[in-house]
Amino acid sequence: MKSFRQYIQEVVTDAPRKHIEHKYRATDFPKTRHNRHATTIHDYKYKHGADVEIHTTHRDTHSSSHFNFKVGGLERRTGESNPKQARTVLKQAVHAGSHHLRTEKPKYFSFDVNKKERVGRSESARKNIYHKIMHRLSDSHGYELHNKKDHPTHGWSKAIQTVTYKRVDKKK
């Protein structure tokens, strides 16, 4: 019998059985004296669920993307409404991430997660499931874990962890 974590990972990261209805828009911002590097914001809006913004910074030698997941236009807990919505939102976020990695092929990609956001009885459940899902996504697109960086916060929020993956170029 599968564990709940294994079930969620498979449901969220397996290929969708049907087309996931969404709108996609990319907006380019050139290099300016205020922005050291040109940036592109990839915006995925799903009909029922998530808004996924992926910010890509274009440097001279490589590009890096940072994933930002929103539910109903707000940054809030994935399963705040109900478990079915949580599964849908995670599936949509993985769909957007997979599409982005497949089409843009950034050298690095990263995401943030609250280290100690309580879900049920466990303080680290949300962090662990995000790590597992993103690891499975990165592995299927040729990326490996590059680093994890903890960011202390100032009183009102929990500690944030930024996880970065690096594309593994195949040697010829």
Image (tube, rainbow, N blue to C red):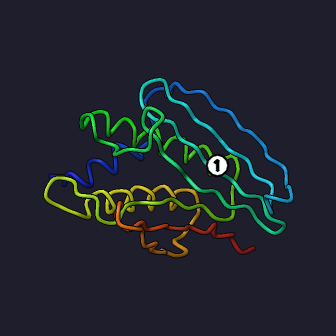
Q: Quadrant of residue 157?
A: bottom left
Secondary structure of residue under mark 1: helix
Residue 60 appears in which quarter of the rendering?
A: bottom right
Q: Quadrant of the C terminus?
A: bottom right
Q: Residue furthest front?
A: 155
| Left or right placement of residue 150 versus residue 35 in this view | left
- Residue at the image position 40 percent from the left and 38 percent from the top: 89
Please rate how many residues cluster around mark 1, counting C-alpha atoms within 10 Å: few if below 14, some from 14 to 19, many from 20: few
Q: Quadrant of residue 36?
A: bottom right
Q: Identify the residue shown where x is 29% and y is 64%.
A: 116
Could you say where residue 155 lies in the image, as x and y percent from the top left? 35, 66
How many marks the image carries: the answer is: 1
Residue at the (86%, 55%) spot, across then down: 32
Q: Is residue 80 above or below residue 1?
A: above
Q: Nearer the viewer, residue 172 or 103?
A: 103
Residue 153: where, in percent of width, then height? 42, 68
Residue at 32%, 63% in the rendered image: 128
Q: What's the amino acid at mark 1?
A: Arg
| Rendered location of residue 68, percent (x, y) | 52, 49
**Viewer-proximal residue among 169 and 104:** 104
Q: Which residue is mark 1?
A: 102
Left or right of 124: which side holds 90? right
Depth order, front residue of 81/1: 81
Location of residue 131 in the rendering, given as x and y in whole percent from the top left corner: 39, 62
* Left or right: 170 in relation to 92: right
Q: Is residue 118 above or below residue 8?
A: below
